[in-house]
Image (cartoon, rainbow, N blue to C red):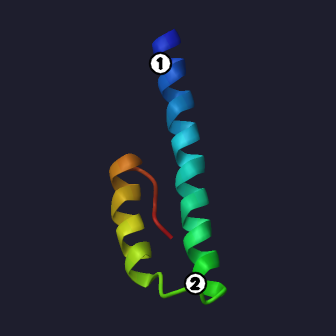
């Protein structure tokens, strides 16, 4: 069971990092540091690879 708990913890941390990355891309765009639209598209693709059952917003 420890292996399963470890995998769940890993995915939970990965999901948090995933959302943090999305937040910073949106923030950079809002602060007009640059156009992050292409990066947000790529983010969606990689996010789906990491957590395929998650629904992208």
Mark sitting on residue 4: 1
Taking the image as shown, residue 4 lies to the left or right of residue 26, namely left
Number of numbered discs overlaid on the protein picture: 2
Taking 51 as reference, is 4 above or below it? above
Q: Position of residue 56 (x, y in %)?
A: 46, 65
Local packing at callout 2 (Cα closer than 10 Å; few below 14, some 14-19, many 20+) is some
Taking 35 as reference, is 13 above or below it? above
* Nearest the eye: 14 or 56: 14
Q: Position of residue 23 (x, y in %)?
A: 61, 67
Check the image and name the residue furthest to the top: 1
Q: Position of residue 11 (x, y in %)?
A: 50, 37
Q: Which residue is mark 2?
A: 29
Q: What residue appears at the point 46 percent right and 54 percent down from the top-left corner? A: 54
- Quarter of the image where one finds residue 32: bottom right
Mark sitting on residue 24: none
Camera-nearest label, 1 or 2: 2
* Nearest the eye: 1 or 6: 6
Taking the image as shown, residue 23 lies to the left or right of residue 3, namely right
Local packing at callout 1 (Cα closer than 10 Å; few below 14, some 14-19, many 20+) is few
First in sequence: mark 1 vs mark 2: 1
* Nearest the eye: 27 or 7: 27
Q: What residue appears at the point 59 percent right and 76 percent down from the top-left corner? A: 26
Q: CA distance from mark 1 to mark 2?
A: 38 Å
Secondary element under disc 1, as helix, strand or loop, is helix
Secondary element under disc 2, as helix, strand or loop, is helix
Q: Position of residue 47 (x, y in %)?
A: 41, 57
State if disc 2 and disc 1 touch (CB < 8 Å): no
């Amino acid at each position: 069971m420890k292996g399963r708990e470890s995998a769940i913890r890993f995915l939970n941390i990965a999901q948090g990092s995933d959302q943090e990355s999305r937040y910073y891309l949106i923030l950079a765009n809002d602060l007009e540091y640059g156009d992050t639209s292409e990066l947000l598209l790529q983010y969606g693709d990689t996010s789906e690879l990491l957590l395929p059952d998650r629904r992208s917003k």
